Image (tube, grey):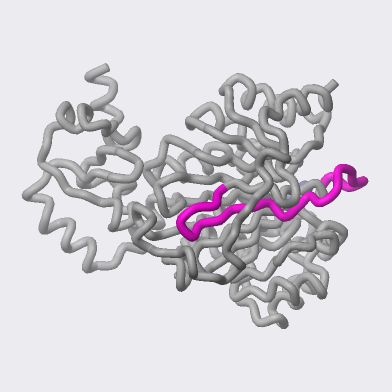
Amino acid sequence: MRFKRIAAVFAVMVTALLCACSAPVGSTESFSSTDAQSGMLAVHFIDVGQGDSEFIELPGGETMLIDGGEREYGETVCSYISSLGYSEITYLVATHPHSDHIGGLPQVLAEFDVENVYMPNVSSSSAIYGEFLDRVEAEGCMVTQAAASVGVIDENGLCAEFLAPVEDEYSELNNYSAVLKLTYGSTSFLFMGDAEELSEQQITADVSANVIKVGHHGSDTSSSQQFVQRVSPQYAVFEVGKDNSYGHPSAEAVGRWQNAGAQILRTDLLGNIVITSDGEGLTVNTSQNAETPAETSSQAQTSAETTSAAQQSAEYSYILNTSSKKIHLPDCSYAANMSEKNKEFTSKSVEQLESEGYTPCKNCMADYDEGHH
Ligand SMILES: [Zn+2]
Ligand SMILES: [Zn+2]
């Protein structure tokens, strides 16, 4: 029954979306940083313990979420995204139906405006999967099957395309994992979900990337030697829980990426990991296991930025996020998370700002909301 249900849920056929990401990988031909609104791509590898969740701020202001950790991390994921000032998720990718990937997604679907959902054509009898499908249907999201060569985005030097699953059927649920390659200018990211060696071997597309979210939490069933060499990344990111019972990541898998020249970044050791790209180079920031992303980011603020914000506070009433259209109070810790390019100071009234399409931040302006609506 579930299989029929998931098939019925796919609104768009795969053939209609076959990707034509035209620029060869690494090409900067069609890339111009002025094409995009902010010019920056930020990939947040959210620390969700033993599970996966990656939130991506796209250069034009759109967003993508790949997985949402276990159910108990739904709140972590939601507050992380809200703290960045977003209320919409343009693209939600559920890599495969295991609970450490889709567990937090029902809450995400409930709290955010999710436009498009991508998932592989495989079902599960688990309660969490049923709940996830219910939510997807209730929210009326556009659902597309994730499979090799299905394109998501191809514009202004930004390309997102699925490289797997290559086949229709696997004996191991992990190998149904939607594998996504994201290219921005001359930089690229590869998100493996829990894809294992079989899937790695089947991918014929170019897998070379600057950053890889390593498959299956660094299990030895993934990261085969040949695949590691094909990817040959600068950074290998492991989403893995501290002292997890699976023994992830395996020393062998870590060693293979290291030997290929990659710097190892682990959420169990570093907390949230953020890698930003301007289309040409990468910058890595980590939270060092701070309690919340908001605190993290305010700690990471340079003293120069803090000073300039303090100096300006006499002249403005609110801080605006021009990308997410959110209004923040000057002392909102969440406002500190914003990229400088989206930040604007204003002395306008909330009423005026609302008429311009802005909405008050749910964190710092919760009282305002209650009092006025
Ligand atoms: Zn997993
Ligand atoms: Zn899995």
Q: Which residues are magenta?
A: 153-173
The residue drawn where x is 45% and y is 72% is 280
Whether residue 288 can be seen here: no
Q: Residue 217 sits in which quadrant?
A: bottom right
x, y (%) of residue 168? 86, 43
The residue drawn where x is 80% and y is 46% is 176
**Nearer to me, 52 or 260:** 260
Question: Left or right: where does residue 85 sit relative to residue 271?
Answer: left
Residue pushed farthest right? 171
**Nearer to me, 99 or 277:** 277
x, y (%) of residue 271? 54, 59
The relative height of residue 34 versus residue 321 in the rendered view (above or below) is below
Question: Left or right: where does residue 296 sit relative to residue 335?
Answer: right
Quarter occupied by the C terminus: top left
The relative height of residue 309 versus residue 108 in the rendered view (above or below) is below
| Residue 304 belongs to magenta span | no
Across the whole image, how many numbered discs are drawn on residues?
0
Whether residue 168 can be seen here: yes
**Nearer to me, 358 or 48:** 358
The relative height of residue 364 versus residue 256 in the rendered view (above or below) is above
x, y (%) of residue 372? 23, 19
The residue drawn where x is 38% and y is 55% is 36
The residue drawn where x is 20% and y is 27% is 355
x, y (%) of residue 254? 73, 72
Question: Left or right: where does residue 193 sit relative to residue 220?
Answer: left
Question: Left or right: where does residue 363 sit relative to residue 196?
Answer: left
Q: Residue 248 sits in which quadrant?
A: bottom right
Quarter occupied by the N terminus: top right
